[in-house]
Image (cartoon, rainbow, N blue to C red):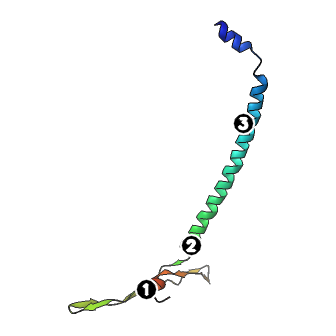
Amino acid sequence: MRTLNRLWNEQDGAIVSAEIMLVGTLLVIGVIVGLKSVRDSVVTELADIAQALDNTSQSYWYGGSQNAYGGTSAASYSDNAYQNGTSAKCIDTASSAMGQG
């Protein structure tokens, strides 16, 4: 009990604890600013990914096949991709995959 009472009344560490509080406060402020920057970067990258997916053309084309036992006919689909009355910049992945782009 005497040791606990002696530690309670000791004043030698008061300056050190104030310095630790100052450094800790500055570190917390720095971490908050850093996390805000990370948040902004993640939101920007996710917006870029969303825009890329939105601008991808969903058109496809299939030329069909035929052999001695039968065949399949060709199929195609065209996505005009209009947004707000204006034409969107589309990436036609189907045509470039089939060698027509």
Q: Nearer the viewer, mark 3 or mark 2?
A: 3
Q: Secondary structure at mark 2?
A: helix
Q: From the image, tell me which residue sits under label 1.
A: 98
**Tag 3–tag 2 contact (CB < 8 Å):** no
The residue that appears at 63% across and 7% down in the rendered structure is 1
Taking 5 as reference, is 76 above or below it? below
Three-letter amino acid code at disc 1?
A: Met
Mark 3 vs 2, N-terminal side:
3
82 or 37, which lies in front?
37
- The picture quadrant where one finds residue 10 is top right
- Give the CA separation, mark 1 to mark 2: 21 Å
- Give the CA separation, mark 3 to mark 2: 42 Å
Mark 1 vs 3, N-terminal side:
3
Q: Is residue 78 visible?
A: no
- The picture quadrant where one finds residue 5 is top right
Q: From the image, tell me which residue sits under label 2.
A: 52
Q: From the image, tell me which residue sits under label 3.
A: 24
Q: Is residue 7 visible?
A: yes
11 or 90, which lies in front?
11
Q: Residue farthest to the left?
A: 69
- Give the CA separation, mark 1 to mark 3: 60 Å
Three-letter amino acid code at disc 3?
A: Gly
Q: Secondary structure at mark 3?
A: helix
Question: What is the x, y in percent for residue 63?
Answer: 37, 89
